[in-house]
Image: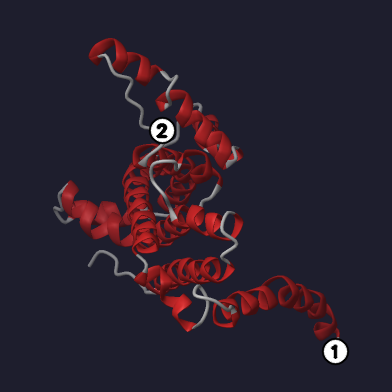
Amino acid sequence: MIAAACLAPAAALFAAFWLLPMARLAALPALATGTAGGWSAYAAVLTEPRYLRSLLQTTGLSLAVTAAALALAAGVGLYLGRRRFAGRRLLLSVLSLPLSFPGVVVAFFVILIGGRQGPVASLTESLFGERITFAYGFIGLFLAYLYFSMPRAIAAFTAAAETLEPQLEEAARSLGASRRRVLVDVWLPALAPTAMATGAMIFATAMGAFGTAFTLASRFEVLPITIYNEFTNYANFATAASLSLALGVMTWAVLFIAARLAARPVAGVA
C-alpha cells in the first residue's frame, strides 16, 4: 500500500507529461482533416521527397558524427583511462567543458570560425578572391555536433578503460600476442558494449538536436527543423506529428538495438 502511494505521483506525472501527449501525437495525423490529414499522413516522411530528403540527410549526418566521435574518443579515452599523470583531472574537466554550452553557443563558435566574417572566409578571400564559408551546411553541422558529442564519448571510454584488467593484456602478451592481436582480442571485446551504448546515445542526440541546427542549417535541412517549420510556419500539425513519430521511432529503435547488443556477454582472451 505504501509502495503504491509512493508511486502515485510518478505515475501521474508520467501520464500527464508523456503518455497523454504521446497518445495525442500518435492520433493527430489520423484525426486531421484536409489533404494533409488521414492515414496517409503517417507515411509522409517516406512518400514526400522533401521530407524523405530531410530524413536521409539527418540520418547521414548523425551516422557521420557517431562514427567520427567514436573513432576519436576511443583513443583519447583509452589513453586517459590507462595513464596517470600530472594534470590528468584538469584535462578531463577541460574536455568536458563543451557540455556546459547550449547548442546555440556551440553553433556560434562554428560561425565565428567558418561564417561569413570568420578567419576562414578572410583567408580564402585573400588566397582565391572568394569568401568560402562552411558554417551553414553539412560541414558546420558536423563540426558542431561532433563538438558537443565528444565529451560524452571520451568520458564513457575513459571509464571503460579504467575497468580493463591489466592481467588480460599481460596474459595475451605472455602467449606471444602482438599489439594488433591484443587490440582485437582484448580491447575491442571489452570496449564493444561501451562503443555500442555510446554510439546509440550520440546518434539519438544528433538526430534530435535542434538549437544548433536552428542556428546553422540554412543550407542543409534536418528533420527537427522540418518539423519546426511544419507546425510554426505552415500550421501543418498532422505532418509535424507524423514526422515527429518517424523521428522518435527511428531513434528508439537504435537505442533498443544497442541496449540489446550491449547486454550480450563478450568473450575474453582464450
Q: Earlier in the sequence, mark 1 or mark 2?
A: 1
What is the x, y in percent for residue 117? 45, 19
**Residue positioned 23% across, 15% down in the render:** 128
Amino acid type of disc 1? Met
Q: Is residue 189 above or below residue 261?
A: above
- SS at badge 2: loop
Q: Camera-side residue: 201 or 116?
A: 116
| Left or right: 40 as drawn, with respect to 49 | right
Quarter the N terminus occupies: bottom right
Q: Camera-side residue: 97 or 267?
A: 97
What is the x, y in percent for residue 62? 38, 53
C-alpha distance separating marks 1 and 2:
57 Å
Mark 2: few/some/many CA within 10 Å (<14, 14-19, 20+): many
Quarter the C terminus occupies: bottom left
Q: Is residue 250 above or below residue 127?
A: below
List the residue tagged with mark 2: 135
What is the x, y in percent for residue 2? 86, 84
Q: Camera-side residue: 60 or 222?
A: 222
Labels 1 and 2 touching (C-beta < 8 A): no
- SS at badge 1: loop
Q: Which mark is residue 1?
A: 1
Q: Which of pointers 1 and 2 indicates the residue nearer the eye? A: 2
Q: Does residue 92 show up?
A: no
Amino acid type of disc 2? Ala
**Residue positioned 37% across, 46% down in the render:** 69
Q: Camera-side residue: 47 or 25?
A: 47
**Residue positioned 25% across, 56% down in the render:** 171
